[in-house]
Amino acid sequence: MSEPTTDYTDTLTIPEPKENLKHPLESYIRSERFPHIWCSSCGIGTIVTAYISGLQKSGLDPEKVAVVSGIGCSGRAAGYLRLDSFHSTHGRALPFATGLALGNPELKVSVISGDGDIAAIGGNHFIHSARRNIDLNIICINNFNYAMTGGQAGPTTPLEANASTTPYGCYEYPFNLPFLAESSGAVYVARWTALHIRRLTNAISEALQKPGFSFIEIISPCPTLYARRNRLGTGLDTMKFYHDSATIQHGADTREVDIEYQKKIIVGKFVDKDKPTFTEARDTFLNKKLGDQYVPYRRPNNGH
Amino acid sequence: MKADPIGVATGSYYLDGDHACAEGAIAGGCRFLAGYPITPSTEVAERMAERFPKVGGVFIQMEDELASMAAVSGAVWAGAKSMTVTSGPGFSLMMENLGLAAMMEVPCVVVNVQRGGPSTGLPTLTGQADMMQARWGSHGDYEIIALSPNSPQECFDLTVKAFNLSEEWRVPVLFMMDECVGHMTEKVVIPNADKIDVTPRKFYKGKKEDYRPFKFNGADSVAPLVKAGDGYFIHITGLTHDERGYPVINAEAQEKNVTHLVNKILKNEEKIRIIEENQVEGADVVVVSYGISSRVAMKAVESAREKGLKVGTIRLVTVWPFPESRIRELAKSVKAFVVPEINLGQIVLEVERCANGEAKTILVPHAGGWVHDPIDILNAIEESIK
C-alpha cells in the first residue's frame, strides 16, 4: 500500500464561519454555564438534547414549559435548560413540580431526574403523583447506580451487578419502573435507551402533549462508574450493547419488562391511555357538588 | 393593599385557634395549601379544604410532610401565596424542604401547632419544645421569622401578619402555635376586608433580560419575584448560587449567599420585631414569655404585683429573630428575667445570652402535656429577687 500523496493538513483546520453561526438548539441551553459536569460519553447530554428536540417537536411554547430536577447527575439537567427550571432537593422533584403545576395550570411541567432520585428517595412521591394523575411529564434517566456520589447501588441496580456498596455484586431485587408507573396510575409509560434518539424524541414530544402523568424511563450509559466497575467497556461499548440487546415491543405487558444484568432490554411504548387529570377530575367533581359556589383557582396576576 | 373580600369571612365568631388560623390565612391571601394530617393541627387543613373551593384556592393533601413542604415552594414559584400546616413529627420532616425554601428565598408560611415531643410524644397535649428547631432545624446557616400567638384572635390576626412578613422579607415564616392555643375556643372578630392590610408580592417589572432572582447586597436586598410561565426562564436551585440563581460552588459565593440569608433577617430584627411590654420601666423582674405561657404567666405576675413586687412582662410575638438589643438594654436595669416555657429550657438560653451576666436568668421549665401552675412562676419571681 503506497503512502497517501494528498496533503490533508489543511482539512484539519476548522474554517472560521462566515457569519455567527449558532447551534440550532442553543436558544434552549444556558451555554454560559458550560462546561457542564457530565462525563465524556455519559448518556445524559444526549437525553437532554432529545428532550429539547422533543419539546420543539411538540409545538409547546417554551415559556409555558418548566423543568424540575432532583439531585444527582441527571438532577443537573434543569440547570442547563433555558426554560423556567428548578433544582430541588433529593427525591422531592415530583412534589415540587406538583406545587408548580397546580399553582400555574397553564404550565406543562417536566421532571428530569435519575432513577435513584425518582424511585428510591422519591419513590413515595412517584407512586402518589402517578396515582393522582398530576399533569407531569417524568423523564427518568436510569444508569443503574448513584453516579454523582461515586457509583453506589440503587433501586434499579440489576441482580449481580457490581456497585461500590455491592462490591460482591447486588443481591437486592431491582424495581421494574414501567410496571411501577403503570400500576400506580400513569397514563403514558415508555422505555427507551440513550441510543434510540429518534424514538425517544418522538416519545418525549408525545408525552409532553399528553395530559396527565406520563413516564419515560431512559436507560443510559454511565461509563465512569457503572460500566467501568462492571468491566463493560466504554460509553460506546454500552451503546453497542443497547443496539444488540434492546428489543422494541410496543404495548408489552409491563409485568414482563424487568431488566436483568446484561440481558435483553425491552423498550417501546407500553401504556397510552386517557384518564382525567387531577385538576380535571377536581374541577368536574367540585362543579358537580358545589355548582355556582365553586370558584376555580386562577393564577394570581397581581401578587394577591 | 387591602384583603380580597372573597376570602374574608367578616363577622364575630366563637372559634378555636386552628380554625381562626385558617381564616387568617385565607384573608391574608393564601390560595395554596399542601398538607398532611397530624394532630393537633389537622383542623387548620380541614377548614381550608372546605373553604378553598369557594374562594379560588388549591388544597392538596400530600403523601407526607416532605412532599407538602416541597409543593409549597413549587406553588410559590408559580405565583400563589402558599402554606402548609403540621405538628412536631411533621415539622421534623419539613426541615429538609424548609431549608430549600430558605435557600430559594420562598415567601411562605409554615404553621406548627406544637405538641409534646420528642418523637410521637404527646399527640393531643401541648408543648413549646420546637422553638429551637424552628430556628435551627434545617442544616446550614439561615434565618427565618417565627411568630407565637396566644389566643384564637391572634391566630387570625397574626396569620395575616405572617403572610405579610413572608412577602416583605421573602422568607419562610413559621407560625408557632401550641396545642392549647390551637384548641382553645374564644371570641374571634374577623373585620371587613378593607380593614385588613395585605402585603402584595413584589413582582419584577423591568426588562426580562435584566431580571435577577436574587440580590445579595445593600439594604434593599430582597429581590422581587417573577412567576414560572412568564418567560423569564429563571433557574432556581438549592445549591449555593449567584444573583442569577446559577450554582457557584466555592467559598466566595457561599459567603455572599449565606451571609445574605442571615443578614436580611438579623440586620432588620428591629423592623421585624413585635413584642408586648408591660410595666418594664422600673421593674426588678421581667417575665419573658410567648404563646400560651404568656397567659399563664399573667396570673403569676398579678399575684406578685399584689404582693408589692415590681414585675414587668415582655411577650415575644416574634420569637425569631430574637429581640436581642431589647433584652440587652433591659438587662442593665432589671435584677432578673424569669422565663416560663413548656420545654426544658430553649428560649431561656437566648435570654441568658443577651443578659450576659448583667441580670439573673431563671427558667421555669415544664416538660409538656399541660401548662404551668402559676404558683411555680410566682415562686420563681420571688426567688429571683431574693
Image (spheres, helix red, strand yellow):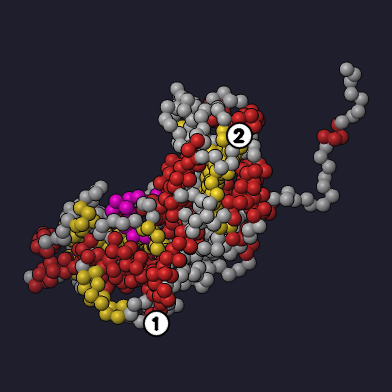
Residue linked to disc 1: B194
Q: Are marks 1 and 2 in contact (CB under 8 Å)?
A: no
Which amino acid is tagged 2? Thr
Range covered by the magenta-colored residues: B83-99
Split into 4 quadrants, where in the image is the C terminus of chain B? bottom left
Q: Is residue B199 visible?
A: no
Q: Secondary structure at mark 2?
A: strand
Front residue of B322 and A165: A165
Q: Position of residue A236 (x, y in %)?
A: 65, 30
Q: Residue furthest right?
A: A5
On the rendered structure, is B186 left or right of A265? left
Q: Residue furthest top?
A: A1
Which amino acid is tagged 1? Asp
Residue B194 is inside the magenta segment: no
Q: Quadrant of residue A264?
A: top right
Residue linked to disc 2: A247
Residue at left 46%, top 70%?
A296
Q: Position of residue A114 (x, y in %)?
A: 52, 42
Residue at left 17%, top 53%?
B367
Q: What is the tally of numbered marks visible in this picture? A: 2
Residue B97 is inside the magenta segment: yes
- In whole angstroms, how far apart are the C-alphas of marks 1 and 2? 66 Å
